[in-house]
Amino acid sequence: MTLPTILITGGTGKFGKQYIRHFLEKEWQVVFTSTSAARAQELEKNNQCGRSCVGIQCDFTKTDSIKQLTDELRTRDIKINHLVNNARSLSFLKVEEDGTTKREDFINEYLLDVVVPYELSVALWKEQPEELETIVNVSSQYGVVAGNPNVHGDRHHQSPIQYGTAKAAINHLTREMAVRMAPDGIRVNAVAYGGVEGRTNEKFKERYGQMVPNGRMLNDSEIPGPVEFLTSEASSAVTGHIIAADGGWTIW
């Protein structure tokens, strides 16, 4: 039996590493992108994944990046069954001293979070309609509700407005793509994650815990589960939905 192949963009980031590890453990073939060839090679080496893991350097801010990626997949004769749109750049989440966001950061965040997932999803849909089965867009609780200033503590340094706005857009893009791709049997969903431990201090974690029913932030081990579900036959009736994996943040 041929094992599924999953393409994970932003594979060397915090979420991407968890996805890669999880699907390699399932013995799937994993293809991932990274802006850095060195980081991609290091990840391949650390996972000792051999031919079952393929890293491809790709800078999605470049206008020809989607074509270069699909050309590379075609050259390697790789057929993608599942796509996880996860690429992002922390450099586009800058906030000015007065709490505002510069135009270039707003545009670039929207480019990576919305335009690139659209372009890549459509490119694979047009090129491999019989192979592509599911698309999962990585979203956030802040694409569903606004950032809570009681958590961030400083109104000028709340969750960047460009981040939440772009995540809200990817949520609606998910619904639109689900409708358009349904005739070809392709399911499109998103996961709206809550905050994950690792980039915050203890005071932030304490404030966060007081605002969420679960009483805590997510941990790394909780990242792959929703994607596992949405790429499996267990979710065969689910398309066009935003699955909340936020510890209950958005229910109150």
Image: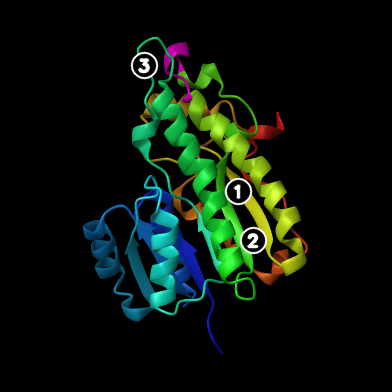
- Left or right, 142 with respect to 26, comes to right
As rendered, which of 222 and 135 lies closer to the eye?
135
> Quadrant location of residue 54?
bottom left
Q: Dots 1 and 2: beta carbons under 8 Å?
A: yes
Which amino acid, by three-letter code, is at mark 3? Answer: Glu
Question: Which numbered dot is residue 40?
Answer: none
Q: Is residue 250 visible?
A: yes
* Location of residue 252 in the rendering, given as x and y in whole percent from the top left corner: 70, 28
Q: Residues within 10 Å of mark 2 (few under 14, many from 20)?
A: many
Which amino acid, by three-letter code, is at mark 1? Answer: Val
Question: Which numbered dot is residue 191?
Answer: 1
- Secondary structure, mark 1, is strand
Which residues are the magenta region? 153-160
Q: Main secondary structure of the magenta part?
A: loop
- Left or right, 247 with respect to 68, comes to right
Residue furthest to the top in view is 98
For marks 1 and 2, give the CA distance: 9 Å
Answer above or below: position of 176 versus 232. above
Q: Residues within 10 Å of mark 3 (few under 14, many from 20)?
A: few
Residue beneath disc 3 = 96
Answer above or below: position of 27 versus 186. below
Residue beneath disc 2 = 230
